[in-house]
Amino acid sequence: MSFCLPANRLSDSDGGREICVLHFEIEAISIKSNMKMLKSKVDQLRLIHGTVQLPCFIPCATRGVLRGISWDELSKIGYNMILVNAYYMYLFPGLETIKKLGGLHQFIGWQGAILCDSGGFQVFSLKPKIGDRGVRFKSHIDGSEHFFTPELVWLSNEVLGADIAMPLDDCPPGEADKKRVEQAVNRTHNWLLRTINAKEKSPARKTEQIPKLFGIAQGGIYQDLREKSVKFVVDLYKRKMIDGIAIGGVAVGEQKANIRQVIRYVSKWLPKDAPKYLMGIGEPEDIIFAVRHGFNMFDCVLPTRMGRHGVAYQRQISKSKLQIPNIKYEKLDLRKSKFKTDKKWGYLSYLLRIGDMQGARLASLENLRVYYSLMQKLRKK
């Protein structure tokens, strides 16, 4: 069982430090019977720019950059895939500019794989005009009007040189009623078929330089709609019309209990041999829960965003009498905490408290290391 508790101020008189900590404990993940039943059979994903070991966490370089972190630093940790948002690249600097500069990899200087999100989530936050043909919206940059279609999004991914392309989907907010969610499911399915058709017509189809296409299943918190959407996407995967399965709409404002319910419910229809991407989920305990239910790809802004705000994840490993390791994490609020004797956190806390940019950078790096270490342990289990 996992618990998320409110922040508590703990005083450690022996260690001479005061810690503001958010603490949660994660149920042992090494119980073999459970893991054998649910674990994925696929352990790697071969892409244009390298092979990615699964399960994996994908850092979010939304606009083609991880704030304050170099690609060399990210690679040294062990990461070889990032997420970039096609919506932002499309608006600025623009597809034509990126194409002239040799594609997205050359433009940003990243040698590893890139998963390109369509930007549908960002577009839908702009109160666009949605129709079956596509989505009309105004740029958040200059107010110019644009019209996204499944075909345009696929073309954008080709121009960018994505390793994995996510199709345009209709992603309603978590509080949407069933009628709106059902409309989103049907529209997402239609747009996926149009994306597949665009891929089939691409001149690059017969080469190894074409992005892998994942299908996105929607459905919100409604079990019948989730079942309908997952089965639709899984059928396309089994017919080799898409290369992976993604579950969307599980990080758009729902309660944690609802997120867990969706994960548990959809996992029964997911093939073990498929890449299974749970979009936008990034709390460590949620990742572990999802891996236990067969998912093997994750992305989230949390490790870097929390780092920039002075919060660091700290992992602790303990063993019970049964020698079953428990994975525990703490979120340390380094801006408020006083580390009088802890050399690891003392200087970092100091940098954050004086507002030096190195503090946020180093905290982000530390969080990315913790996440990478977690994925390594999950692969071994």
Image (spheres, grey):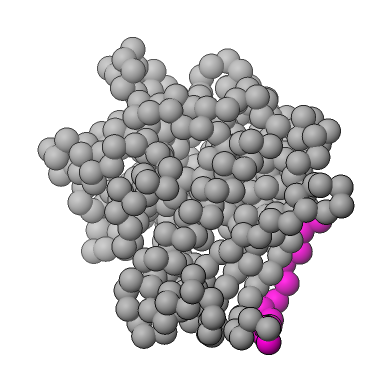
Q: Tell me if 121 is positioned left or right of 151 in this view.
A: right
Q: Which picture quadrant has residue 210?
A: top left
User: Can residue 133 be seen from the camera position used here?
Assistant: no
Can you say which quadrant of the picture contains the C terminus? top right
Image coordinates of residue 78 in percent, x first then y, are 43, 43
Furthest-top residue in this view: 206
| 371 within the magenta span | no
Image coordinates of residue 11 in percent, x first then y, are 68, 86
Q: Nearer the viewer, residue 30 or 203?
A: 30
Q: Tell me if 41 is positioned left or right of 373 in this view.
A: right
Can you say which quadrant of the picture contains the N terminus? bottom right
Image coordinates of residue 243 in percent, x first then y, are 50, 24
Considering only vertical position in the picture, is 119 above or below 257? above
Q: Nearer the viewer, residue 277 or 362?
A: 362
User: Can residue 369 be seen from the camera position used here?
Assistant: yes
- Residue at image position (32%, 74%) is 357
Q: Tell me if 288 is positioned left or right of 184 in this view.
A: right
Q: What range of the chain is rendered magenta?
A: 1-13
Q: Which picture quadrant has residue 12?
A: bottom right
Q: Which picture quadrant has residue 231?
A: top right
Considering only vertical position in the picture, is 207 above or below 361? above
Q: Tell me if 310 is positioned left or right of 25 in this view.
A: left
Image coordinates of residue 377 in percent, x first then y, are 62, 43
| 8 within the magenta span | yes
The majority secondary structure of the magenta stretch comes to loop
Total labels: the figure holds 0
Considering only vertical position in the picture, is 217 above or below 203? below
Considering only vertical position in the picture, is 20 above or below 358? below
- Residue at image position (55%, 48%) is 373
